[in-house]
Image: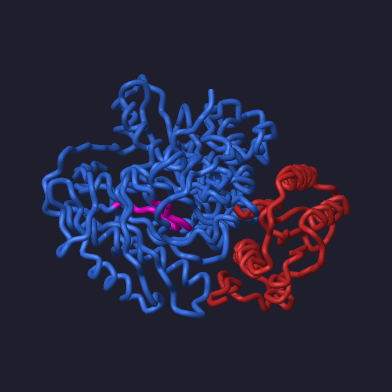
Amino acid sequence: MRLELGYIHITDIRFGDASKVEDGVLYVNAEEVEALVLRDERITSVKVDMARPGESVRITPVKDVIEPRVKVEGPGGMFPGVISPVDTVGSGKTHVLKGAAVVTTGTIVGFQEGILDMSGVGADYTPFSKTNNLVLVIIPRKGLGSHEHEHAVREAGLKTAVYLGELARELTPDSTEVFETLPLTEGVKQFPDLPRVGYVQMLQSQGLLHDTYVYGVDAKRILPTLMSPTEVMDGAIISGNCVSACDKNPTYVHQNNPIVHDLFARHGKDLNFAAMIITNENVYLADKIRSSDWTSNLCAFLSLDGVIISEEGFGNPDTDLMMNCRKITDKGIKTVVITDEYAGQDGASQSLADAHESADALVTGGNANQVVTLPRMDKIIGSEEYVGIIAGGWDQNKHEDGTITVEIQAITGATSEVGFAHLSAR
Amino acid sequence: MKVLTNNPKVLEQFHSYPAVTVDYRAVSLHELMVLVRDFVHARHRLLTHPLSGSVKPNETLYKSIGLTEQPEDQLCLESLNLIEQSISTVDRFARIRKDIKEEHHQDLQLVDLTLISSAIDSLAAAKPLPGTPPSGSSRLSST
């Protein structure tokens, strides 16, 4: 499967009479976006706003971040099974508005959502302070249930990203990148002397605000399976989770998964990127046993020499992480696990809620309990009302001078377990 | 499945659900975990992960944990290890006290309800019992 990504570099975002891209500037007609979002009768009103890198702006509570893309050649459309009809994506050509993002915000439950600062110390912790963001503040119909509300917000963000992505359809990319995976036997023959490395991606799959969707299927209900890594670049995996925002993968991160990109970059040099396997993190323990059995069996079946396993979340998924690591190691395959840590505000406590001796090669995305004081921002998009009660916030963390003190678990993407942020340790 | 819970929404939703026995206790999260450990000592096996969900133990009051309905022949050491580790994690988080306002109790109960519902769906899919609604029906659509 061969996919060419064509990048149109976006350096600014502005409101305009017509939505278009011109000289690297993304112009957005806010009325058209409003009309698009309000086609969903579950939504009463939407405020379309913008936030640019370096501005004194805080967006909170963040639900999802999505990169605008459009398929210009090849089967399927963006977000198959959700926005576009179900069809296998990941081949042909896709145009990307690189440097732009759609950010959704709304209050689905009265706690637990992310902070995204466009400047100041908080901006250093979130990758989305570097993108030109179109922000949707979504107000639902009164009485709408939480599940329906979450679904409406999720869909509004994806639809808006598709709308913006369409602006790139006829444009000539500023740069292109090609990714190709071969069928199994051809892949083996291509680089027979290099170690065959696979990527196991664990997906959040527990309940409301803790879910992920694969081609529109709730990941709780999948068996671990193989995917072409280029499929995720076309939106085959989307996020429906944001609780404890630091280590959840927004849709943007799935579209740009750095493990996938780095494995492609080293493919044919010092490794043979052989396969991507997705699995889940269910609450029911029998599901964990079945999924980790299945995942390790797939790794052995594919004759992998090494596997990178990325986690999503903390606590319950630590058990899946250790089960996957132990069972894959038991097949004689080397493993590296990627996680983040909840090691206490002083960093001195046990980092994970589960452990196994096979997890002897581990990369961290940082300590989510690390405390940071964020400066006052001139403008708040969304509401700061929740900062004291979101994950990582606590009572009396708002100070008289307008600063707030939080653990970095409150910051969207701060301790990404696929390495999309900047924290780690040696 | 026996569901030990301190979440009134779980009691309300599943009190008459055929495959589930709800054992509701009006206790703290820590006390609930210790009660679960007592059941594990009494040879019940854990069926769900005690640290379900991403709401951290010091940010919520509610938890629902599934165990085998009846004691088994032997003590399940894996269950014991898991509940011990989970209690240790809960206690570690408890050192950082966070104020949980009453207005958010309903939301916290709802999230816990959806987490245990996902496990009950898995149970129903794996072991359909007479009178058990089909998988997925335990999920709430409008609350």
The residue under the point 39% across, 77% down is: A44
Q: Position of residue A7 (x, y in %)?
A: 21, 43
Q: Residue at x 18, y 61 (%)?
A: A16
Q: Nearer the viewer, residue A370 or A195?
A: A370
- Disc count in the image? 0
- A251, above or below B111, in the image: above
Question: Does residue B105 lie above or below A77 as drawn?
Answer: below
Colouring style:
by chain
A25 left or right of B77? left
Quarter of the image with the N terminus of chain A is top left
Left or right of B55 on screen, residue A204: left
Report if residue A65 lies within the magenta region.
Answer: yes
Query: Residue at point 36% right, 27% down?
Result: A272
Instruction: Using the rendered view, name the quadrant where residue A269 is placed.
Output: top left
Residue at the extreme front: A401
Span shown in magenta:
A57-67
* Nearer to the camera, B125 or A214: A214
Give the color of chain A as drawn: blue
User: In this structure image, what is the colour of chain B?
Assistant: red
x and y percentages locating residue A51 in the rendered image:
33, 52
Query: In the rendered image, is residue A3 in sight?
Result: yes
Q: Main secondary structure of the magenta part?
A: strand
Residue for point 22% across, 37% down: A178
> At which x and y percent is residue B68?
77, 59
Instruction: Please tell me whether residue A369 is drawn above or below residue A25 in the rendered image.
Output: above
The image position of residue B42, as x and y in percent, is 88, 54
Q: Nearer the viewer, residue A371 or A246?
A: A371
Inspect this view and state whether residue B126 appears.
Answer: no
Residue A77 magenta-drawn? no
Image quadrant where residue A54 sits: top left
